[in-house]
Image (tube, grey):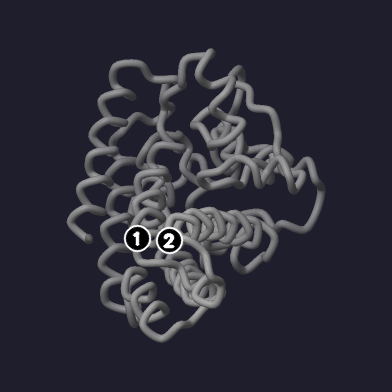
């Protein structure tokens, strides 16, 4: 299963990288280097950290829940396909709510700001997260899998979506207009998510969805995307070494010049 998960993620990475080269949606401010060194460095570090620190993997949590009858879906009689579909949808809702939490709680925002500090938006932005955020997110994910009693197959599907989907929604591409018009009603697209990385707080406090776009629409956090003059990043960090080096990104939440607080003007550029 881990091989399947890794193959899917690497396949999407290669496809998105080629697509970005062939038909980029926007010109990059800083280009791929040194951003890719920082972003991919964080991605590799986080994978290693999870393997070392997490008591069990997400798949193992699904196995434990099934073997012990833990969780909501193990107490409800339904066809296997329905349990798998429910688990994937509900885990996606958990990701949406966790994302909102990382924007709303000041201490969590200081960690999540490392992701938003990327001054460009491409597939590697999808793996640019501070290790402390990954630790918190992994704990929430394992708790959600156990509480839901998510089937192992559903967990595998979700894990593939978590890795491959993050790179897709952050990729520097645009779907054809006729496709985008319909797809965004169900799924998060790069054009829909790009505004979430705007320097304008009202814009980056919107479109939190991970895979399904329905949560933003149902819960009032959807904002119409636009391409012209969209400025990416966090204003205080755009020209600092915290963007350009792995060490800088790691120390960013604890630096004297920290990301703007979530408390204050709704129009703050942050």
Side of 107 relative to 68 (left or right): right
Quarter of the image containing the C terminus? top right
Q: Quadrant of residue 94?
A: bottom right
Camera sees residue 258: no
Residue linked to disc 1: 153
| 5 sits left or right of 144 in the view | left
Give me the disc on residue 189: none
Marks 2 & 1, CB-CB < 8 Å contact: yes
- Which residue is found at the position 25% from the left and 25% from the top? 18
Tell me the distance, in whole angstroms, between the alpha carbons under discs 2 and 1.
Answer: 10 Å
One can see residue 15 in this view:
yes
Q: Is residue 127 above or below residue 105?
A: above
Element type at marker 2?
helix
Q: Earlier in the sequence, mark 2 or mark 1?
A: 2
Q: Nearer the viewer, residue 195 or 155?
A: 155
Quadrant of the frame with the N terminus: bottom left
Residue bearing the label numbered 2: 80
């Amino acid at each position: 299963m881990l091989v399947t998960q890794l193959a899917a993620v690497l396949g999407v990475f290669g496809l998105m990288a080629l697509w970005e080269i062939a038909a980029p949606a926007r010109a990059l401010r800083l280009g791929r280097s040194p951003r890719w060194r920082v972003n991919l460095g964080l991605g590799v570090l986080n994978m290693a950290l999870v393997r070392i620190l997490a008591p069990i993997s997400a798949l193992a949590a699904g196995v434990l829940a099934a073997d012990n009858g833990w969780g909501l879906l193990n107490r409800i009689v339904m066809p296997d396909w329905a349990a798998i579909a429910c688990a994937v949808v509900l885990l996606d809702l958990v990701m949406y709510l966790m994302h909102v939490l990382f924007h709303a709680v000041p201490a969590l925002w200081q960690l999540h700001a490392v992701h938003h500090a990327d001054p460009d938006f491409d597939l590697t932005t999808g793996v640019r997260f501070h290790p402390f955020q990954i630790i918190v997110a992994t704990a929430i994910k394992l708790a959600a899998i156990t509480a839901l009693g998510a089937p192992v197959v559903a967990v595998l599907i979700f894990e593939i979506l978590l890795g491959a989907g993050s790179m897709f929604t952050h990729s520097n591409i645009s779907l054809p207009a006729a496709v985008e018009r319909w797809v965004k009603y169900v799924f998060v697209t790069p054009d829909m998510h790009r505004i979430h990385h705007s320097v304008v707080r009202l814009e980056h406090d919107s479109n939190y969805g991970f895979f399904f776009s329905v949560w933003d629409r149902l819960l009032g956090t959807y904002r119409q995307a636009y391409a012209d003059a969209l400025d990416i990043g966090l204003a205080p960090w755009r020209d600092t070494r915290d963007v350009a080096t792995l060490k800088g990104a790691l120390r960013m939440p604890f630096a004297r010049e920290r990301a703007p607080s979530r408390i204050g003007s709704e129009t703050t550029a942050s």
